Image (cartoon, helix red, strand yellow):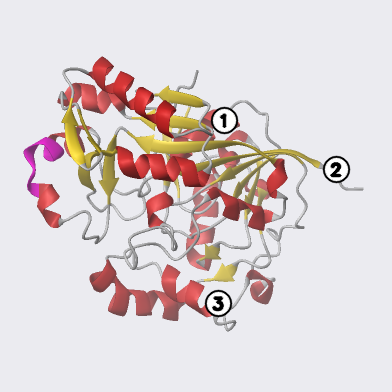
């Protein structure tokens, strides 16, 4: 007899990816309060950096629960590169983690070599994609001509998920709000739904969602092409300093991230549409080291005298504009996310 789902928490990005979602999921997973950690969208175009006992690990598709002995599910709206998946399995096994906990939805779609080749030749230079075949794979999914895990079931025989969820569930997002196929700066976006409501595709009702943890950095970053993040940002001396101090390179691709001031207008919108209840603003220490205390609000750059003034203003603005937001946490810990 199947047990019931008792609680669902979700962690999502509120910017353009690289917001520290993996560290938040790692922090929450340490509590051992979850029976499952689930990934609901995207493919190996995403990346999470996790610190376990001060040792750094990187994953691209497999959920972060694996580092804490928690069942880790790759959901039906994810896309899977078979070679990359098994390379990640090998990497985790070599580092002593129990890969028997990893399960994959039979309905997840397969990224084929033709998808990757098409991405490289037609999309990478035009749109600045990761060239991982994500967009062509999702296109074939919606054209109903794609291949699914169930079509390769012998290859995935040890990893097929039985679609059963129970107890407490933590859902781990990929990319960020402003890369969402519907809300991002189309066509400079990803090819999946990055908003937390899509986590219900894992197989639970939205009424079961309790907390939505929203992740953002205290400054904005973006990889890939986007007119809202022009190449000229690389030439800004302030942003060069922040980027160097913050080690702003993509986990999956190693691409240098463009840096800009935190856009409060976009953050407010992302919080309100995503339904974020608990906000985690990370890399406060980087801004302190850089001594650059600025945000964008009402389309103007606002400068502060010090970090305390900046954090106080951010908090005051968000409390007044985001009625669903219950907690705001600022973090400056490089190894994990500290939450009150």
Task: Tell me where residue 221 appears, x and y as whole percent.
Answer: 27, 45
Disc 1 is placed on an element classified as: helix
Residue at 32% over, 19% down? 312
Q: Would you call the spot at circle 1 few (<14 residues within 10 Å), some (14-19), or many (20 or more)?
A: some
What is the spatial separation of the Cα atoms under label 2 and label 3, in whole angstroms? 33 Å
Q: Which numbered dot is residue 3?
A: 2
Q: Which residue is mark 3?
A: 142
Dot 2 or dot 3: first in sequence order is 2
**Which residue in the rendered view is the most extreme toward the right?**
1
How far apart marks 1 and 3 lie (CA) works out to 34 Å
Residue 100: x percent and y percent?
Answer: 68, 49
Q: Is residue 46 left or right of residue 82?
A: left
**Bounds of the magenta segment:** 235-240
Q: Quadrant of residue 166?
A: top right
Which quarter of the picture shows residue 121? bottom left
Residue 103 position (above or below residue 77):
above
Residue at x-position 58% and y-position 62%:
77
Q: Is residue 13 left or right of residue 292?
A: right
């Amino acid at each position: 007899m199947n047990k019931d789902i008792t609680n669902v928490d979700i962690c999502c990005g509120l910017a353009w990816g690289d917001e520290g979602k993996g560290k938040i999921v790692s922090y929450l997973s340490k509590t051992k309060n979850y029976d499952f950690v689930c990934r609901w969208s995207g493919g190996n175009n995403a990346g999470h950096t996790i610190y376990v006992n001060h040792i750094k690990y990187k994953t691209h598709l497999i959920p972060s629960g694996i580092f804490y002995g928690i069942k880790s599910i790759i959901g039906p709206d994810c896309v899977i590169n078979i070679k990359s998946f098994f390379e990640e399995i090998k990497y985790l096994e070599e580092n002593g983690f129990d890969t028997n906990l990893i399960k994959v939805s039979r309905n997840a779609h397969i990224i084929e070599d033709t998808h990757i080749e098409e991405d490289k030749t037609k999309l990478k230079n035009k749109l600045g994609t990761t060239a991982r075949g994500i967009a062509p794979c999702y296109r074939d999914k919606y054209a109903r001509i794609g291949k699914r895990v169930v079509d390769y079931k012998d290859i995935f025989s040890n990893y097929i998920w039985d679609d059963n969820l129970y107890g407490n569930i933590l859902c781990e997002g990929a990319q960020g709000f402003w890369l969402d196929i519907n809300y991002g700066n189309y066509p400079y976006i990803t090819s999946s739904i990055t908003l937390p409501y899509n986590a219900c595709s894992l197989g639970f009702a939205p009424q079961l969602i309790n907390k939505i943890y929203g992740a953002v950095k205290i400054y904005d970053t973006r990889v890939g092409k986007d007119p809202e993040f022009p190449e000229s940002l690389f030439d800004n001396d302030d942003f060069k300093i922040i980027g160097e101090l913050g080690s702003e390179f993509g986990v999956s691709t190693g691409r240098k991230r463009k840096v800009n001031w935190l856009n409060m207008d976009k953050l407010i919108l992302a919080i309100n549409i995503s339904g974020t209840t608990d906000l985690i603003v990370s890399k406060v220490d980087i801004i302190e080291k850089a001594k650059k205390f600025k945000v964008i609000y009402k389309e103007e750059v606002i400068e502060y005298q010090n970090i305390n003034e900046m954090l106080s203003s951010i908090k005051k603005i968000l409390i007044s504009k985001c009625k669903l937001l219950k907690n705001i946490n600022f973090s400056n810990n490089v190894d994990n996310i500290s939450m009150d």
